[in-house]
Every structure is written in structure tokens, then in C-alpha cells.
Amino acid sequence: MKKEPFSEMYVNGKVRKAYAVLSEWYNTCDPDELTQKQKEAETLFRRIGITFAVYGQGQDAERLIPFDMMPRVFLESEWRLLERGVKQRARALNTFLWDVYNRREILRAGIIPKHLVLQNEAYEPAVVGIEPARNVYSHIVGVDIVRTGLKDFYVLEDNCRTPSGVSYMLENREIMMRMWPDLFKQTRIQPVEDYARLLRHTLESVAPAKCEGEPTLAVLTPGAFNSAYYEHSFLADQMSVELVEGQDLFVDGDFVYMRTTRGPRRVDVIYRRIDDAFLDPLCFKPESMLGVPGLMNVYRSGGVQICSAPGAGVADDKAIYTYVPEMIRFYLGEEPILKNVDTWRCSESDDLAYVLEHLPELVVKEVHGSGGYGMLVGPASTKKQIADYAERIKQNPGNYIAQPTLALSTSPTFVEQQLAPRHVDLRPYCLVGDKIELCPGGLTRVALTEGSLVVNSSQGGGVKDTWVLAD
Amino acid sequence: MLLSIDHQTSYRYEHPQRRIVQSFRMTPAECESQQVMGWSVEVEGACFGASFTDGGGDLVQTMTLSGPASTIDVKITGTVRTFDTAGVLKGHQELNDPGLYLRETSLTRVDDAIRELAAETACEGALDTAHAFTNLVAERIVYSPGSTAHGHTAIDTLQAGQGVCQDQSHLLIALARSAGIPARYVTGYLLTDAEGKYHEASHAWTELFVDGLGWVGLDPTNRCCPDERYVRLGSGLDAQEAAPIRGVSFGHGTEIMDVAVTVMQMAQQ
């Protein structure tokens, strides 16, 4: 348990190759100047307006996520391993989605218990038998990864619906290049600026069969009050496509149209950033004001592609997560490249007994929770917190899963005018369309509090630029 | 039996509406108990499109109407030849796994009272259990038109002790699912004679999945299995999902809906 976490910068007191350039550069910098630059960077972020709404806090809900100037670095050889692993996962998850809405082979084979899929809240009966373009359901897969050793990478969770945070990946890089142009001249850092072009290409490649000519895309947002609205408008802008809300779209006959100043224009592919339940009041929540009446019928009859496809969420459910390695073997006939974290399901009595006995060393999460809310980090909790949490688990065991506390790797972080190791995770963004592409970079989140393992921005985490360096 | 169906749904709006969008699940699928001889769905001035067959085997169509419109009339006329299959649904094409119909919906939620009732009524086999549940609902829930409100759940119905076919079906579904038997809501038409107990030509009942037999229709309102007097229109997890018409209109004011359904037996030829 008390094993030293893997340091990404130092091995046996020596700087690793990945961080050599960065370390050299840092040694030539004046700490006062760095502090000054850090302030400048924050001002830039504020000027762009990139903020993040923190749930569960009364006031000051929109705030800036702290940005750390020290990049997190991977060597190209390390990245290649990650890339293969993430792509493999994205392929398996998409095959799983096609399967559970069509032939259900994995259920017939008894590899995943039927009820976990068919009675899963995220399983969408309305799309059974519907085949989306290229049989792709999750077009943007965000895989949350932590590192525990030189070659040890674990997947914490998959995000198959609408993973957010990619605007940070792009903005962090942009700010870094503005602050330290010289640093980018002397190192071969793989570019991430291509992401918007790749995303656009991916979306265009899944235009429905009924689309003739160049497909028209739109980004569908719930509106300005949404915490990720900045990202929605940013991505629409970067792809040069329209940003629309439900009321801007309407269904007529076989297709969906958007209102424009030059009259109605047919939309072929919708990159939606709203949940399934709010897409269409004729199919889901009848009282939803955000949705487009009839949209699901157009989708189901092949008149429009919705990305991610409605019902894609069943692949990233925490109860399904434990079966992803089996999925990879079943569908692809390959061994998983990235590891899954051992998971105890409190719905099972043996697992529950184990979890209740080992709470001080476990991380416990709510099955449907996200963003680090409502979780228990055993080693960082008091006896009272653990006892209270045990009561919550006993009230509703099926709502909880538990995992061992992983020793997350550390990356040097600029705190109080010097570098200190802080725990980090990584979310790369995998695009799935006619090809599977992984942008060489991602969102690195860092736990700014010493020793903390919770990197969520809602819990005081920060972000870093993520570099992939030529070896 | 050869049945002719005439089903008219009219919507009157207080103020003209800018646009109306509706999703129809109003075309019967063929199976051994019914052969569709002719069927038409018409709405004057409307544009029909975006149609497909859903996982339950029902044809779904989309109707859009650009306003201003202060009325719409949905006219359905059809002729169906029916056969008695002792309530068993045979030859019906569908993709859904029966296990899907164990999902709980807000209208069919199970509480302790329903769970206990199901446990004490359940028999050895699924078919006996299905009939026992049907009789239980018929006994416990008095059929009384006007006693119910939109959004009544199975829990509400058991507490009230009365309801209409929709409420009785929701309770039967909740009982069945709580006993691990897949169950679904079915909409359709029923031929009722003048002396018949109920005069509802537009009807709803339930299907339960029995291993070895498949889907079996059960009508708790009439305490029987559907026979040749029944025409099956569509199905879903509950009344909302199986609704023949789901719609949204854009505009102000209230909406009044009026439904007239007649089912008549035609001379056999």
C-alpha cells in the first residue's frame, strides 16, 4: 500500500529522457519570472472566458480551473502503447454497442449477464435494430487513464457519450505556445491543433446514407447555462459549423432542418452535447423543452446521424466497465493492452462484505456518479467519514462499486515558486468514424493538493498541457 | 372474423398553432391472429415521413403539419381478418429481447405492496401465474370510467382499487415484472356487442412472456385472453411508450382532443 508512486520526471534520482528538455529549460528560468508568467496565463484564460461550473457550491459557481505551466510529457514510444490501447478499447466498445442493439451475441454467449445490459438505465430500447452510419455509436471516446509504472496504465472509466474537456487540451497548448514560443522551437512536440479538423472529418464520415453531397453539420447545445457551453461554442467555431439549440431545429417529413437567416437548411450530422433524455419529447421525456420533436424518428429512419448515437451510454456504465477486457477478447480476439482496475460490485454479497471490511484502503464510487462527487477515498478519510459512508453503502449496496487505491503517477508541478510532485491522470480523445484517430495529447488533470489523489476540477484539481515528444 | 375499424382523432386548438409534429404508432403488424386487408392513416394537409419499424415490430410514422392550424383530424380506416390463437402471439416479427420488458418505468413502478401481492399470488409455472395475476387485477380493480387521471401509476391504481383498462394493465405489468415475468402494454381495438359489459372499442391490454409459449395476451378488464374480437395495434413498456399518437404543437392556448372509434364485424366473403 505504501509504495512510492511512479515519478514521471525522475527515476533513481535522475531525470528521465521524457523530461530532459523541460528540466534543462526550467533550470534556466527565474522563479519570479515563472510566477509572473503563471499570472499572465491565468489572465489569458480569464480573457478567453474558459470557465467551469462547479456543481454543489452555492456561490461563485463559475470559476477558472487552475492551469499549471509545467507540461506533462510522454515519449512517442510510450504514447504508441497508449494509442494502441485506447484505439483497441474504442473499437471494442463500439462493437459492443452495435451488438447489444442488434444480435446480442455477447449476452447469448453468457459473457455479460443479460440484466446488466437490458435493464440498464442507459440501454435505450428505442434504438433496437437501428444501425447508425458505419455502425459507429460512440464517435468521441474519452478514456480516463492513470499511470502507475513505466509500462503500467490503468483505465479508470470510459466516456462514450459526450466527453468534455477537449477545449482545455487545445487552449492549454495555445497558451503554452504564446507564453513560451522558444520552448516549442527547440523541441519536437506533436501538434494537437489538428483536433477540430479531425473531429469535423469524423462527423462528416458518418453522414447518413440519405445525405447527398457534402454533409451539413451542427453542434447541438442545451444552452448558455450549461457548464460546458464554452466548449460547445468553441468546437463549433473551430469546425466552422453552426452552434444550435433545440428550438433552432425542426423536423419536416423525412429530415431535420435548422433555421437560418437564409431559410431552412437540412442538417445531416448533429454533434449533440445534450443527454439522450432531452433529445426528443416524442420519444423520451415528454416535458423536455430542450429537444426537437420528431428528431428520433428521423434518426431511426436514417435521415440524420446523431453523435454520439442515442443509447451509447450503456457502454460506459460503471457496471459494464468491469466487462470491457472480456469484450476485447470476445469481439477482437486480442488481449487488452490497457488494464482495468479491479472492481468490487457491492450488489454482490461477497464483494460487499469485502468492501465493508476494507474501506480504509479502497476508493468507493456511486455507480451512476461522476465528477468525483459522492465518492470515498479511504486512505484520505477520517474514521468518522468511513463509518458514515459504510452506512450509506448498507442502505443501497447496488449503488456502489469499490476499487483499490492506485498509486497515481506524479508529474512536476509549479507550486509555491518551486516544482513539486503532484498526482496526475489523463483523458485522451479518440475519434471514431471512417478511421480511428487519437490526437497526440489530451487533458492532463492534476491534484494540486499535496498527496491528494482526486484530480477532478470540481474538487480543486488543475490542468496541464500534455506533450508527446519525439524520442 | 372480418373487422372494419374507423378511428378518428380530432384536435381542436384554442388558437391556431404554428406547427404540429406527431409520432404515430397506428398501423397493425401482421401475425397469425391478424391479417391486414387494408389500412390507411390520413391527415389532411400533413406531411408524412421518417417511418421505420421499431424493436417491438411496430411501424412508426412521423406527421408534420405547418400552420397556422386550429384543427387536425387523424383518420384511420382499415379492415383486418382475425383468428383466435388462444391469446398466444404467433408469427409476429420483432427484434427486442423479452428480457427488455423487465425494465421498470415510472408508470409501472413496484412498491412493497405490489411486491408482496405478487409473491403471495404467484403459482408454480409462469402461465398459471399470468392467469392468477390477471384474475387478481380483475378482482381488486373495479372498472370505472372517469375514475382515473393521466399519469396514474400501478401503485396509485392498487391504492385506489378502481381504474380503466390502462390502469389495470399497468398493475398487471408491475405484478408480472416483480415476479420476473417480462410484461408489456398493448394497444388495439375490440369488437363489443351492444349487450357487452364494456363499450370501449379503443382498448388496451397486456402481454406476458411465458417460456415455451412466447408472448401471451391477457386482458384484465374482460378477464380473458384476446381472441378474434381483438385487433392488436402496438406495444411498449407502458402506456406512454405504446401510445398510438405522441405529439407536440407549437403555439398558445389549450388543446381539446376528441376520439371516436367504431369496430364493426363485416360479412365474411
Image (cartoon, coloured by chain):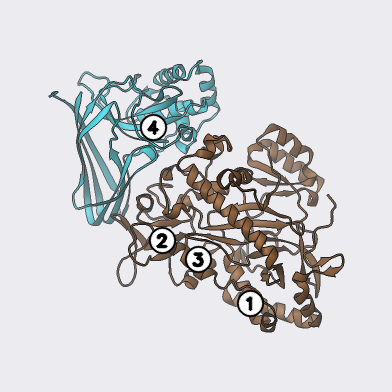
Chain colours: A brown, B cyan
Q: Mark 2 falls on what kind of element?
A: strand
| A53 on left or right of B217 | right
Q: What's the residue type where badge 3 is placed?
A: Leu
Q: Quadrant of residue A254?
A: bottom left
Please state the total of marks drawn on the protein image.
4
Q: CA distance from mark 3 to mark 1?
A: 21 Å
Q: Residues within 10 Å of mark 3 (few under 14, many from 20)?
A: many
At 75% from the left edge and 79% from the top edge, which residue is drawn? Answer: A35
N-term mark: 3 or 1: 1
Q: Is residue A43 visible?
A: no
Q: Check chain identity for marks 3 and 2: say if they share one.
A: yes
Disc 4 and disc 2 in contact, CB within 8 angstroms: no
Tell me the mark number nearer the camera, choosing from 4 and 1: 1
Q: CA distance from mark 4 to mark 2?
A: 34 Å
**Label 4 marks which chain's residue?**
B
Q: Residues within 10 Å of mark 2 (few under 14, many from 20)?
A: many
Residue at mark 2: A269
Residue at mark 4: B185
Q: Check chain identity for marks 4 and 3: say if they share one.
A: no
Task: Tell me, for residue A199, which label it has, or none.
Answer: 3
Tell me the mark number nearer the camera, choosing from 4 and 3: 3
**Label 3 marks which chain's residue?**
A
Residue at the far right in the pictured view? A13
Task: Tell me, for residue A175, which label it has, or none.
Answer: 1
N-term mark: 3 or 2: 3
